[in-house]
Image (cartoon, rainbow, N blue to C red):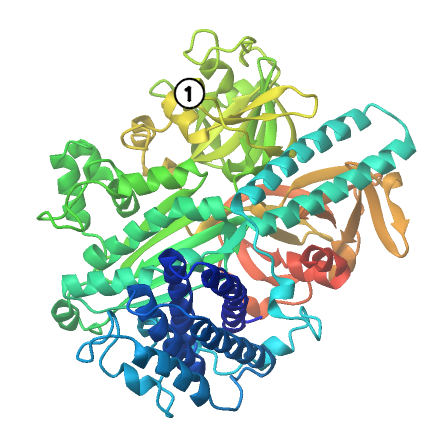
Amino acid sequence: MTNDDELLRDFLVESYENLDQLDRDFVALEADPRALDRIAAIFRTIHTLKGSSGFLDFGRLGALAHGGEGLLSVLREGTLALTPEITSALLAMVDRIREMLRNIEATGREGEGTDVEILARLGEFWEASPHTTSSGARGQPVVMSQLFSSVPAPAAAAPSSVFVPETHRPASSERLRDDPALPPSSSATDTTVRVDVGLLDKLMNLVGELVLARNQILQFGERLEDPAFASATQRVNHITTELQEHVMKTRMQPIGNVWAKLPRVVRDLSLSCGKQVQLEMIGKDTELDRTILEAIKDPLTHIVRNAVDHGIEAPALRAARGKPQNGALVLKAYHEGGHVNIEVSDDGGGLNAEAIRSRAVERKLVTEERAARLSPHELAQLVFLPGFSTAAQLTNVSGRGVGMDVVKTNIEKIGGSVDLSSVPLRGTTLRIKIPLTLAIVPALIVSSGGQRYAIPQVNLLELVRLEGARAHAAIERIHGAPVYRLRGKLLPLVFLSEQLSPGSRWRLDAPSSGSAEEASINIVVLQADDQKLGLVVDDVRDTEEIVVKPLGRELKALNVFQGATIMGDGRVALILDILGLAQHAGAVARDQRKSEQLQSAGPAEQASGDDRQALLVFGVGDGSCMAVPLSEVARIEEFPVERVEHAGSRKVIQYRREILPLIDLHDVLDVPHPESEDGASIRVIVYTEGGRSVGFVVGRIVDVVEDTVHLDRCTARRGVLGATVIQGKVTDMLDVEGVIRAYHPAFFGVRAA
């Protein structure tokens, strides 16, 4: 269903409900004609119907509603008393409107006929009222009497309609009538139910408790060897997962609901600044949990205001720079990897790097020596520091040194991240990455000192395990700070046992023994703000969906934790706040969001640019290499060959109490299976989406690398998106979705259902 059809359906549903309410109100009003509050409510309902009709270009419907509004106006003023005859005339108007709505729903048009008789009858009562002929009743012009003539007056469009493109006004709705979601004889109201938001929140909480109970049952089932109980447990698991997905959908709303007020904001601000700005919105149907939408509403408004005020130049300056006088502001939203990305881009003058540098030194936000070493990207991040502004003078829009730091803080509170990039004279782009929901999130469970902790997967990049003597030799220190060289880049380390030990302010009952004497080291590579961070833990357990429970008021000050969850055994596990933990450990400075020690390590050891990504490189066949983004890899497993079974003609394997379909990439790419040194086992890359998994059988795992990907799509073929050069070697990029659709089409089909 298109946006136009959805808009029309909303109009029909709301109008039908309003008409039913009007029937009840008019009958009640006859019993108490002096109930002015009820007359006012009826007037507002008719006024709303008139405005919506004008917005959707239903002139006849709007004219009829306008006639009823005129009579209700004098009734509301008390200059005319309600009589049974007037009530009958108004109810006849309601019946005619209901008839038009049925025609609109069936054919997309108001229907043939004339409303002269009804309008004339309404006009007679209006003429009989002792109104002032020079000015009419309050809110009614002198030409009011013309409305009740034989010529229908055009409907008054709603004020907001001047900001809506013509394409948003459906002239016809034949598609609505043919919508397969509607039974042939059903009304739009038959397929729509209005539910109180509080009830949805309660339902979501109950689903969260069900997920906790499911996790307990699954953990209990692991200790039993009862096939019947295992089958019932698996059924409960599947039902709970589907119920969770559908309840989540009831809370999802399009981001267009938040964007709806931005055209007016841009228009008013453009006029006050003497600028010409054209706003374009892409991806308005992208859906988010309503709690997330509420959290990003104010930050988005501030970002847009900044773009108009700071980013886009005045028309004269744009003309001098060879640009169109109309500045372009683009809002874009899209789903990616279980998150929603929002981009706000303008084609303005970009950030003034030197002005930012000098103002940061002037405000003593950074030292002069460090400011001279900052890259353009790092300079751009300074605008998020508290108290920072480059505005030359105070206005009602900017210059007070507040705003962008609050924007970043609010986004990070909901588990999101903000990044800013700018090109001088070409424009600025601000990117926001936020989770789809906050209620139930996937997390990695780790342990330290006998305690379990949950790490939201939104922060997780990869896992590194150092074995034996190599483990402790690989840990270095720069200015006293522990680091690990991960593929040539310095990774700051935080030992969880040290941060949560009895000697720290976050004291727990079971402190860790530390990892210095252990034979191996587990490093969880995380994203803290815009910097990578290695968290050293005692053990890595598993990944599971957790229900986020807020901390009590007494624990709100502990910024290393963002909440708690109940594990399958009924015990509580704390959810780590990665940014807060990094700041507490000094790996990310509170005031600068960067570690001074790592900045002095040299530019060669700093993180790479945004065009680089982590890749898993693996072998298929004899010597050929392929790669897949690490973000699409859930796990890498090795199974004995004898565990492979068949379901029909497909290879499958029992994996984590589920049946994991296998896709052998040697067969997909038509390459021979290599003669492995260990022919008794297979290596499988597990891909997971929407709670379902599929496994790719590969030859060998080569490495995890970080490199720039420039695809040559001329080399694309079945199973391959194209080729790129990774660390000096031509490497094919695996077409994950294409292979799954070709060899396991039900994977996405079931998900879409």
Q: Which quadrant would the N terminus be assigned to in this image?
A: bottom right
Classed neighbour count for the residue bearing mark 1: other residues with Cα under 10 Å, few (<14), some (14–19), many (≥20): some
Based on the displayed image, in which of its 4 quarters is residue 542 positioned?
Answer: top right
Based on the displayed image, in which of its 4 quarters is residue 383 positioned?
Answer: top left
Name the residue rendered at 32%, 64% in the picture: 76
- On screen, residue 352 versus residue 479, left or right, reads left
The residue lying toward the viewer, choosing from 302 and 719, is 302
Q: Which quadrant would the C terminus be assigned to in this image?
A: bottom right
Is residue 674 in view?
no
Question: Residue 228: x, y in percent?
Answer: 91, 34
Question: Residue 103: x, y in percent?
Answer: 57, 81
* Number of marks in the rendered image: 1
Task: Tell me if residue 246 comes above or below residue 3 in the rendering.
Answer: above
- On screen, residue 623 versus residue 54, left or right, reads right
Task: Tell me if residue 295 comes above or below residue 133 in the rendering.
Answer: above
Is residue 620 in view?
yes
Q: Amino acid at mark 1?
A: Leu
- On screen, residue 279 versus residue 618, left or right, reads left
Name the residue rendered at 50%, 77% in the picture: 92
Task: Tell me if residue 714 comes above or below residue 564 in the rendering.
Answer: below
Helix, strand or loop under label 1: loop
Dot 1 corresponds to which residue?
558
The residue lying toward the viewer, choosing from 443 and 284, is 284
Question: Residue 446: x, y in percent?
Answer: 60, 24
